[in-house]
Image (cartoon, coloured by chain):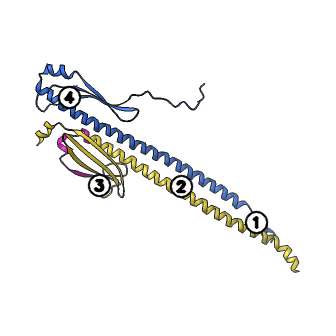
């Protein structure tokens, strides 16, 4: 009787055992592969965010540089200023910004320089220096 | 019991896992490759922008020295002598990178009042000096 029971149940027990073993191996491989893939996705997301931030900051600094080059010399009597921009690179308020630009001005001889430093809320992204020649006679007149 | 044992399909979970892992790896690789190329492009843009504004800064210091020498000439010479000495135009190139340069051309002006500019910028542009070499390494089908 016992032998007959063994004959009946042995194939099923064996199949379940193999299936369980396969399932364990599958879960193990899946967890290893998904760890690698999630790491790749995270890297790609980080790089994508970095390149978006860099592109926006370059665009903002170029806009600023061109307006500085074409502005009147008498408008830049300030030593430093901070400007705030939203995620699309448009000017925004101090409370809802994504990027901000800290601009410091220096004068050396007849050259006026603007050093534009772009930041996100937590990191420095890009810096650009723009020089503009202002004839000495114009500066004297302004004084 | 017979019907229960038939429901266990050994190998189906392995096939499913292989399919899912292949999909994950494909999408993760595509995402990583795309964001890497985006990031490289952004870095290229950063280098080019910085190189362009460095060239602009050099051009501004050249313009400053030209303005200084034109001012000295204008103070010493009459209008006719001024134009005979400095010529009709002054042009120079500032290299941006291996391929491109900043071409600046200006027309000297004899000042009528003290605050007048001593030159008029006629060209301020990026030019490609070397001929472009197209990449012909791939043989495309040409009918």
Which residues fall within the magenta stretch?
Answer: A68-86
Q: Is residue A72 magenta?
A: yes
What distance separates the C-alpha of mark 2 from that of mark 4? 57 Å
Badge 1 density bin: few <14, some 14–19, many ≥20, Cα 10 Å? few
In the structure shown, which secondary structural element does the residue marked by tag 3 occupy?
loop
Residue picked out by circle 3:
A93
Q: Disc 2 on helix, strand or loop?
A: helix
Residue drawn at point x = 85 percent, y = 77 percent: A5
Q: Share a chain, discs 3 and 2?
A: yes
Res. B143 image quadrant: top right
Indicate the chain on which mark 2 is placed. Answer: A
Tell me which residue sits at (59%, 51%) in the image: B26
Identify by letter the chain in yellow. Answer: A
The residue wearing badge 4 is B119
**Which quarter of the figure is the N terminus of chain A placed in?**
bottom right
* Left or right of B107, for residue B79: left
Label 1: which secondary element: helix
In-front residue for pair B141/B66: B66
> Is A34 covered by the magenta stretch?
no
Q: Are the residues under badges 4 and 3 in a single subunit?
A: no
> What residue does disc 2 label?
A40
Q: Which residue is mark 1?
A: B7
Same chain for marks 1 and 4?
yes
Seen from the viewer's position, the closer of residues B30 and B101 is B101
């Amino acid at each position: 009787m016992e032998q007959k029971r063994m004959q009946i149940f042995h194939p099923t027990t064996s199949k379940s055992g193999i299936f369980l073993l396969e399932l364990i191996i599958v879960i193990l491989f899946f967890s290893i592969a998904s760890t690698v893939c999630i790491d790749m996705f995270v890297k790609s997301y980080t790089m994508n965010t970095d390149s978006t931030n860099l592109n926006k900051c370059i665009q903002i600094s170029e806009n600023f540089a061109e307006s500085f080059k074409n502005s009147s010399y008498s408008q830049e009597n300030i030593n430093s200023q901070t400007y705030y921009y939203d995620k699309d690179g448009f000017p925004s308020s101090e409370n809802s910004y994504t990027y901000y630009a800290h601009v410091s001005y220096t004068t050396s001889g007849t050259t006026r320089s603007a050093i534009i430093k772009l930041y996100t809320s937590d990191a420095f992204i890009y810096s650009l220096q723009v020089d503009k020649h202002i004839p000495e006679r114009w500066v004297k007149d302004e004084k | 019991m017979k019907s229960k044992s038939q429901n266990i399909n050994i190998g189906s979970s392995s096939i499913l896992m292989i399919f899912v892992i292949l999909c994950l790896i494909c999408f993760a690789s595509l995402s990583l490759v795309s964001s890497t190329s985006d990031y490289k492009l952004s870095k290229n843009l950063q280098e080019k922008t910085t190189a362009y504004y460095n060239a602009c800064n050099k051009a501004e210091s050249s313009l400053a020295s030209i303005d200084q020498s034109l001012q000295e000439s204008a103070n010493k010479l009459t209008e006719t002598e001024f134009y005979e000495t400095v010529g009709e135009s002054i042009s120079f190139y500032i290299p941006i990178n291996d391929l491109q340069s900043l071409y600046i051309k200006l027309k000297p002006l004899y000042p009528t009042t003290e605050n007048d500019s001593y030159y008029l910028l006629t060209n301020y542009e990026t030019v490609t000096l070397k001929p472009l070499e197209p990449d012909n390494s791939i043989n495309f089908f040409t009918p």
